[in-house]
Amino acid sequence: MPTYVAFLRAINLGPTRKFPKAKIVEAVEDCGFTDVETYINTGNVRFASSLRSRAKVEKELEQAFRKHAGFEVPTIVMTPAELRQVATDAVAVAEKHQNTGAHYVSLLKEKPAAADVKKLEDLDHGEDLAVVKGRGAHLLVVTPSARGRLSNAMVEKLLGVATNRNLTVVKHLAEKWGD
């Protein structure tokens, strides 16, 4: 049975949009998925499913999350190989650019069109830099986020639905769940 990794967007941020790990596991199991495991409270879930279509898996999860959480939870699903590739790309981007700030990865629901990637990468982000590889938009952020221009919201505006994780989490999940 194929294994997938799901990343839930915008949950457990402050006092709203609470979705405890136990409820996430329950929702995933209600889809008929098995071997469910979560990592930290930002919405990272690994599971097995007999479904072979990533889009079908995402749809099933989003419906279950809506039912269990009471609000929409956009969900990005990757295979372990796709997650490994995003992490490999992240390390290569970090080594190439030697950023002195934070490195975030916006995990994209779909691989973006080349023209949209060019728009994001060519924007003036001040000291910050965006590099897109496959389904990962790498945000190398020197400017503190309150003043910076580069954010997951900017990525979503140009590339579509995405959720953000820091480089440490992406690398850890690739090691843990990248099979």
Image (cartoon, rainbow, N blue to C red):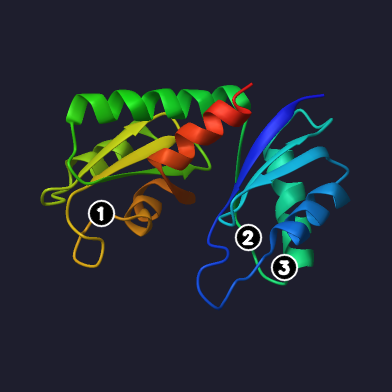
Say whether disc 2 or disc 1 marks the residue closer to the N-terminus: 2
The residue labelled by disc 3 is 69
In what quadrant of the picture does the C terminus appear? top right
The residue labelled by disc 2 is 73
User: How far separated are the C-alphas under marks 1 and 3?
Assistant: 29 Å
The residue drawn where x is 61% and y is 26% is: 80
Q: What element does badge 3 sit on?
A: helix
Label 3 with label 2: CB-CB less than 8 Å: yes
Q: Nearer the viewer, residue 179 or 48?
A: 179
Q: What element does badge 1 sit on?
A: loop
140 w.r.t. 20: above or below: above
Q: In the image, 150: left or right of 13?
A: left
Q: In the image, 21: left or right of 143?
A: right
Percent across and percent down for residue 10 are 53, 62
How many neighbours does mark 2 have within 10 angstroms: few (below 14), some (14-19), or many (20 or more)? many
User: How far separated are the C-alphas under marks 2 and 1?
Assistant: 23 Å
How many neighbours does mark 3 have within 10 angstroms: few (below 14), some (14-19), or many (20 or more)? some
The residue labelled by disc 1 is 150
Q: Amino acid at mark 2?
A: Val
Q: Amino acid at mark 1?
A: Leu
Percent across and percent down for residue 169 are 47, 41
